[in-house]
Image: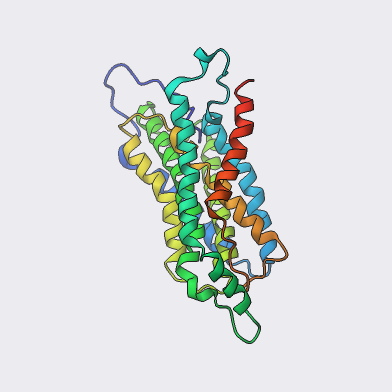
């Protein structure tokens, strides 16, 4: 669902035919149900090796980044830098800042999610056949890896819910299918939520389910709420408040950076399930990844 959907408000104060309650219930069902199906399904694919689960998540993440960058209006990279008068102004810089803030937020989450390098090395050495994995000692912190992906991805969902309700409050029909362009559009959104849930489930499977970290009953419910309930919050506000949701997408798309880094690590044959502690990435890795993105992004501004 794109934030670019433009619906002109009716000049006269005609009643909204799609009620507030229907809007909230619609986005709740279309978001949370497929998200939870994906989370429980992928985490229970016990016969599929971990590295293939990670590879599946990587493929989904590639497309999700491309798709969401479109919703983020490609960070206004279509605004030519020359002449400078068409650079895009303060709004352009605000979108760029929002994107950078997303990367910074993930760097902070990762700092608390992964034990420091010295501890990580001791954990890896201590994971011997007769000694059992010591990763369980860091169970709570390592769960922050998939939570970080879900939470930042959920900001993207906040924008989707906001857009959904904005459209629902404006159209003059009581049929949700007609309001959003037909059956295909109604099918597309839950599918997107299902595959977003698969990305988070892949990260959770690699770093928690199969790593020796104790799996708690609250993990998947919380992951689903971080991913999906933000859409409900967005819909609750967006039904009556207009806002440029590009900023939500610009912040949320950075989840792809972090998901990809972690899934690539899990694909590596040196990553031993239940034995190898997650790599301490550190702020320099996030800075370098962001710098690489913005270097080529700057070149795109000249297009």
Q: Which image quarter is the C terminus in?
A: top right
Tell me residue 35's x, y (percent): 50, 53
Q: Is residue 1 left or right of residue 50?
A: left
Q: How many marks?
A: 0
User: Is residue 36 visible in this depiction of the protein?
Assistant: no
User: As rendered, which of 83 and 162 lies closer to the eye?
Assistant: 83
Say which residue appears at 43% left-offset and 53% top-offset: 226
User: As rendered, which of 50 and 11 lies closer to the eye?
Assistant: 50
Tell me residue 161's x, y (percent): 41, 40
User: Is residue 28 visible in this depiction of the protein?
Assistant: yes
Instruction: In the rendered view, tell whether residue 224 sits above or below residue 100.
Output: below
Say which residue appears at 63% left-offset and 42% top-offset: 63
Q: Is residue 54 left or right of residue 222?
A: right
Locate residue 280: give its quadrant. bottom right
Tell me residue 138's x, y (percent): 49, 71
User: As rendered, which of 43 and 245 lies closer to the eye?
Assistant: 245
Instruction: In the rendered view, tell whether residue 18 sits above or below residue 140.
Output: above
Instruction: In the rendered view, tell whether residue 125 sits above or below residue 245.
Output: below
């Amino acid at each position: 669902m794109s934030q670019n959907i433009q619906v002109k408000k009716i000049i006269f104060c005609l009643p909204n035919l799609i009620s507030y309650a229907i809007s909230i219930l619609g986005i709740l069902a279309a978001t949370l149900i497929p998200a939870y199906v994906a989370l429980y399904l992928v985490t229970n694919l016990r016969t599929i090796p971990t590295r293939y689960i990670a590879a599946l998540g990587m493929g989904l993440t590639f497309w999700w980044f491309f798709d969401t960058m479109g919703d983020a209006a490609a960070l206004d990279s279509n605004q030519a830098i020359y002449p400078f008068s068409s650079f895009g102004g303060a709004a352009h810089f605000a979108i760029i800042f929002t994107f950078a803030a997303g990367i910074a937020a993930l760097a902070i989450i990762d700092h608390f999610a992964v034990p420091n390098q010295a501890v990580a090395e001791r954990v890896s050495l201590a994971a011997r056949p007769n000694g059992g994995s010591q990763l369980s000692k860091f169970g709570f912190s390592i769960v922050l890896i998939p939570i970080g992906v879900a939470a930042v991805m959920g900001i993207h969902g906040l924008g989707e819910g906001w857009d959904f309700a904005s459209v629902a409050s404006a159209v003059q029909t009581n049929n949700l299918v007609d309001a959003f362009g037909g059956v295909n559009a109604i099918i597309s959104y839950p599918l997107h939520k299902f595959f977003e849930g698969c990305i988070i489930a892949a990260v959770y499977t690699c770093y928690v389910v199969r790593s020796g970290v104790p799996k708690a009953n609250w993990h998947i419910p919380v992951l689903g709420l971080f991913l999906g309930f933000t859409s409900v919050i967005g819909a609750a506000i967006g039904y009556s408040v207009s806002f440029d949701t590009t900023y939500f997408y610009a912040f949320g798309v950075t989840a792809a950076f972090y998901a990809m880094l972690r899934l690539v690590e899990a694909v590596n044959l040196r990553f031993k399930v239940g034995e190898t502690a997650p790599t301490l990435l550190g702020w320099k890795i996030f800075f370098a990844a962001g710098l690489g993105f913005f270097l080529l992004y700057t070149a795109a501004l000249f297009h």
